[in-house]
Image (spheres, rainbow, N blue to C red):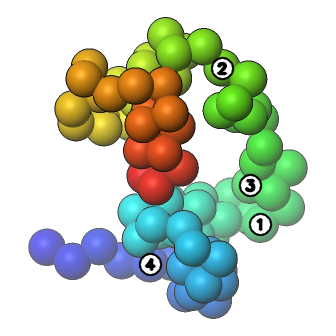
Amino acid sequence: MAKSIKDEEMYERLREEGNSKEKSARIANSAAAEGRDTVGARGGEAGDYEDMTKDQLYERAQRVGIEGRSDMTRDQLIEALREH
């Protein structure tokens, strides 16, 4: 089943910025449902990965479903989260 993108313009812009397909679709669909201003105001609350402990990074990786996280170093967790 193909996923439907609700805000194609935003999706394409996010992809051009280097975001993953999944992340771009999530943001674009949230923007379409809630409004761009609402989603934009919420953005950035996650904090900087460099300021997080390995345990915090692991928990975040677990929440978003990154596989192989238990064998990853702190730097690998950061990279995996950024690519997700």
Q: Which of marks 3 and 4 is nearer the N terminus?
A: 4
Mark closer to the observer (4, 2): 2
Q: Is residue 45 left or right of residue 77?
A: right
- C-beta proximity under 8 Å, tags 3 and 1: yes
Disc 2 marks which residue? 52
Using the numbered discs, state the Cα–Cα distance from disc 3 to disc 1 in whole angstroms.
5 Å
Q: Position of residue 76 (x, y in %)?
A: 42, 37
**How crowded is the residue under tag 3: few (<14 C-alpha within 10 Å), some, or many (20+)?**
some
Q: In this view, does 47 lie to the left or right of 10?
A: right
Using the numbered discs, state the Cα–Cα distance from disc 1 to disc 2 in whole angstroms.
28 Å
Mark closer to the observer (1, 2): 2
Using the numbered discs, state the Cα–Cα distance from disc 1 to disc 4 in whole angstroms.
14 Å
Q: Earlier in the sequence, mark 4 or mark 2?
A: 4
User: For the residue marked with disc 2, what is the amino acid?
Assistant: Met
**Position of the N terminus by quadrant:** bottom left
Q: What element carries label 1?
A: helix
Q: Where is residue 32 in the image (x, y as percent from the top left)?
A: 62, 70
Q: Dividing the picture into quarters, in which one does residue 35 lie? A: bottom right
User: For the residue marked with disc 4, what is the amino acid?
Assistant: Ile
Q: Position of residue 19 (x, y in %)?
A: 54, 68
Disc 4 marks which residue? 5
| Residue 63 seen anywhere in this rendered image of the structure | no
Which one is nearer the viewer's eye here, 42 or 35? 42
User: For the residue marked with disc 1, what is the amino acid?
Assistant: Arg
Q: What element carries label 2?
A: loop
Using the numbered discs, state the Cα–Cα distance from disc 4 to disc 2 in whole angstroms.
32 Å
Q: Is mark 4 on a helix, strand or loop?
A: loop
Using the numbered discs, state the Cα–Cα distance from disc 2 to disc 3 in whole angstroms.
23 Å
Mark closer to the observer (2, 3): 2
**How crowded is the residue under tag 2: few (<14 C-alpha within 10 Å), some, or many (20+)?**
few
